[in-house]
């Protein structure tokens, strides 16, 4: 028995837009696959015959536990009709870009150079939509190496250099530190949405690379705002 998953159908749909899909006797659709076909109004055939009962027919899909689900390599989402994960990621990007601008605005009266640096990162967040919509390739961000963040690990998902605690409210520039950390937390959350959409597939245009780079730049900015002259990253 061959189980047809949502990822299988996405791969077929990318090669050639499906108008119908024939479920033969040796096939079963997973719930995700069935939903994929229904969402795109792709006719489900049972051994070549359209069936209005295909959605509810127990022979067309199965309920599987996490342990029973077949392992399928993650593939890129279809470009024919973006699914809800892609729509949500686009909305998150717009929201995060706006958060960068709001924080840059708040920093204007406190540290103009820091405010301008945040605006520069906002442009990078906005540019990420070109990867989502056009699969475009973006150049690596410019940054200055430090002891903990180097050219070798700049694009990696590094942990925060140090934990932000209530103690960081006390310094004169404590608000700057907390605002920058808010942006870094937003990038952490964005990473989860990216992994949900793209899986762990890595390539030159991978969304996670740009998310990691922006987050690591923010870590350096937080370290600088704290007033440290040496890298505070803990190995």
Image: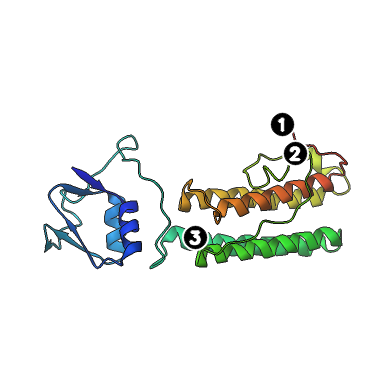
Q: Position of residue 136 (x, y in %)?
A: 55, 64
- Residue 148 - label: 2
- Residue 235 - label: 1
Which of label 3 and label 2 is nearer to you?
2
User: Is 122 on the left-hand or right-hand side of 131?
Assistant: right
Q: Position of residue 225 (x, y in %)?
A: 83, 48
> Marks 2 and 1, Cα distance to the nearest angstrom?
8 Å
Q: State the image quarter where residue 37 is shown.
A: bottom left
Q: State the image quarter where residue 55 is shown.
A: bottom left
Q: Position of residue 193 (x, y in %)?
A: 52, 52
**Quadrant location of the N terminus?**
top left
Q: State the residue in front, 208 or 166.
A: 208
User: Is 138 on the left-hand or right-hand side of 173?
Assistant: left
Circle 2 — which element?
A: loop
> Marks 1 and 3, Cα distance to the nearest angstrom?
35 Å
Q: Are marks 2 and 1 in contact (CB under 8 Å)?
A: yes
**Quadrant location of the C terminus?**
top right
> Marks 3 and 2, Cα distance to the nearest angstrom?
33 Å
Residue in the picture at 86% in, 41% down: 228
Q: In this picture, is 4 found above or below 84?
A: above
Mark 3 nearby-residue class (10 Å; few <14, some 14–19, many ≥20) = few
User: Is 64 on the left-hand or right-hand side of 159?
Assistant: left
Question: Mark 3 or mark 2, which has the lower sequence index?
Answer: 3
Q: State the residue in front, 62 or 213.
A: 213
Which of label 1 and label 3 is nearer to you?
1
Question: Mark 2 or mark 1, which has the lower sequence index?
Answer: 2
Circle 1 — which element?
A: loop
The chosen color scheme is rainbow
Which residue position holds label 3?
88
Residue in the picture at 31% in, 63% down: 39
């Amino acid at each position: 028995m061959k189980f047809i998953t949502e990822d299988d159908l996405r791969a077929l749909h990318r090669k050639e837009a499906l108008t119908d899909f024939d479920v033969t006797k040796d096939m079963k659709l997973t719930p995700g696959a069935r939903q994929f076909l229904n969402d795109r109004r792709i006719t489900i055939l049972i051994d070549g015959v359209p069936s209005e009962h295909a959605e509810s027919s127990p022979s067309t899909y199965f309920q599987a536990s996490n342990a029973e689900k077949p392992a399928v390599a993650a593939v890129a989402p279809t470009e024919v009709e973006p699914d809800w994960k892609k729509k949500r990621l686009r909305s998150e990007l717009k929201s995060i870009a706006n958060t960068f601008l709001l924080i840059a605005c708040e920093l204007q009266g406190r540290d103009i150079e820091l405010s301008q640096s945040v605006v520069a990162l906002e442009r990078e967040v906005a540019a990420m939509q070109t990867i989502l919509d056009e699969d475009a390739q973006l150049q690596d961000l410019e940054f200055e190496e430090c002891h903990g963040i180097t050219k070798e690990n700049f694009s990696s998902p590094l942990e925060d250099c140090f934990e932000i605690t209530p103690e960081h409210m006390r310094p004169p520039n404590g608000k700057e530190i907390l605002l920058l950390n808010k942006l870094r937390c937003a990038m952490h959350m964005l990473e989860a949405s990216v992994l949900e959409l793209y899986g762990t597939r890595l390539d030159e245009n991978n969304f996670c690379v740009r998310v990691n780079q922006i987050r690591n730049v923010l870590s350096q900015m937080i370290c600088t705002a704290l007033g440290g002259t040496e890298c505070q990253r803990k190995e």
